Image: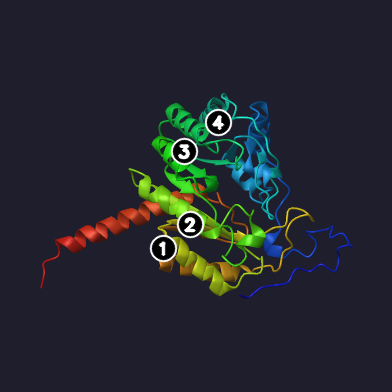
Amino acid sequence: MDQHSPDNKHEDGLGRNLHIGKPAWLKTKIPTGENYFWLKRSMRARKLATVCEEAKCPNIATCWNERTATFMVLGDTCTRACRFCHVKTGWPLVPGRPEEAWEVAQSCVEMKLTHAVITMVDRDDLPDGGADHLCGVVRTAKQALPSLTVELLVGDFRGKVEAIDAILPAQPEIWGHNLETVARLTPRVRDARATYQQSLEMLAHAKARAPYPLLTKSALMLGLGETQAEVIATMKDLRAHHVDLLTIGQYMRPSKKHLAIKAWIPPEVFDELALEARNLGFLGVAATPLARSSFRAHHLYSQALAARTLTATAASNQQGLPRS
């Protein structure tokens, strides 16, 4: 894989100044704008956490100024300790707040959303992993705004498929779960309780169990030491488990306590991988250095719907052709 090694010569012995030497294509402006500050005040007033803030997403200003945000429910403390993630770790032992579903729904209404992304921290401390609470959040949002489409970004629920079965009655349009990296690097990158095969199986189960045309989605980070061949193999694994949508972005180290960046991956490599992904049959692909799980979420959903319609039309036309 073509790559640029991080320029660390400006760092001190403790690894500080982590953003010095960052290539130009990864530099973003300081968040600003009227809608950005309005959303920030709205989130704090409702005591809502967003993955945009917790994960230090580089696209926060762009998305928030378009009045688009990813809601993070079930608190801001994750029971996992993935080595790339900035969300704090702990064992909360408190259930989701009953009023959270109403707060998310009201925010969707106030923001006049057409598509909402709802994600969650892993809650291994709860018997159902938070599944019942998440189902209630989705249902309430859809009841408050009937035109709303909902995308979930969830954990693996420790491989307990009954958690998936408990959420599907709320009928989210997209079921997202991130593979994050290639098989070889998974033990080093993700929490030990999260395995490569388990993630693939949970995605496949959601697709198979949904009594409606559910779309499934995953994401990969580059720059952790993977090869391009490994990335392509991972994309093939995702398609073998019927995953429809894919985002691919550059790994960005949140702090000196997290995994080091092995390489800066240039934009042209992302372009190559996007083409490969489309050739493999993904219905929607976002592959750029700054792409994150919910990057252009509604756009990818629209891509997938258009691709489905095109495929269905082609199949219908093919059936109507006279046999030779």
Mark toward the start of the polypeptide (3 vs 1): 3
Q: Going 68% across and 67% down the picture, which residue do you hit?
A: 264
**Residue toward you, 21 or 160:** 160
- Gap between marks 2 and 3 measured at Cα: 29 Å
Do labels 2 and 1 touch, CB within 8 Å? yes
Callout 4 amino acid: Val
Which residue carries the number 1 mark? 240
- Gap between marks 3 and 4 measured at Cα: 14 Å
Callout 1 amino acid: Ala
Which residue carries the number 3 mark? 114
Q: Residues within 10 Å of mark 2 (few under 14, many from 20)?
A: many
Mark toward the start of the polypeptide (3 vs 4): 4
Q: Going 58% across and 38% down the picture, which residue do you hit?
A: 71
Which residue carries the number 4 mark? 104
Q: Secondary structure at mark 2?
A: helix
Q: Going 46% across and 61% down the picture, which residue do you hit?
A: 238
Q: Secondary structure at mark 4?
A: helix
Answer with the quarter of the image where residue 283 lies.
Answer: bottom left
Mark toward the start of the polypeptide (4 vs 1): 4
Callout 2 amino acid: Leu
Q: Secondary structure at mark 1?
A: helix
- Gap between marks 3 and 1 measured at Cα: 30 Å
Answer with the quarter of the image where residue 18 lies.
Answer: bottom right
Q: Which mark is residue 200?
A: 2
